[in-house]
Amino acid sequence: MENAIIILTLIVIAVLAIKPTIKHFKGSGGCCGGGDYQPKKKKLGKIIQKKTFQVKGMHCEHCCRRVEEAVNEIAGVSAQVKLKKGIVIVSYEKPVDDGIIVHKIEKAGYQAELFLL
């Protein structure tokens, strides 16, 4: 009888552990918080310049949304994140120091640097 209780307990624990894993692989939970939140798209007027930044530490779509939202908080710039390439393309409506963008990305929890071609 005791063995049956232990086995049943282990099965319940396994099911509770597998459920979040399945959500993670479906993209609706897990890594860095998951969820279906989408940051607001930021529209700029006349774009005067585009720069690419290399970002390390992004693992999922939630990471991309965090980076995009962090950069979009800066007045005069808009971000587009490419997870597979590990980059952020920043469009400028007015001149903004690269250090401000790097600082915002790093404050969000990632490593960033200007990507020089």
Image (cartoon, helix red, strand yellow):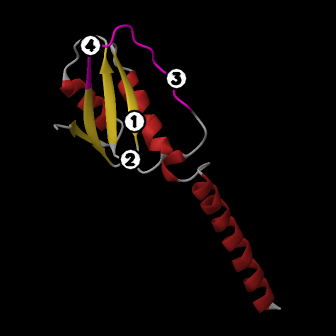
Q: Mark number for residue 40?
A: 3
- Mark 1 residue type: Val
In this view, the residue in front, 45 or 36, is 45
Query: On the picture, is 28 further left or further right than 72?
Result: right
Counting from the top left corner in percent of width and height, residue 26 is at: 62, 54
Q: Main secondary structure of the magenta part?
A: loop
Counting from the top left corner in percent of width and height, residue 88 is at: 33, 35
Q: Reading the chain from its start, which is encountered first: label 2 or label 1? A: 2
Q: Alpha carbon of mark 1 to alpha carbon of mark 4: how far?
A: 19 Å
- Mark 2 residue type: Met
Magenta residues? 38-50
Task: Estimate how packed mark 1 is, as few (under 14), some (14 to 19) or many (20 or more) residues with alpha carbons within 10 Å.
Answer: many
Q: Which residue is mark 1?
A: 81
Q: Nearer the viewer, mark 1 or mark 3?
A: 1
- Mark 3 residue type: Lys
Counting from the top left corner in percent of width and height, residue 16 is at: 68, 65
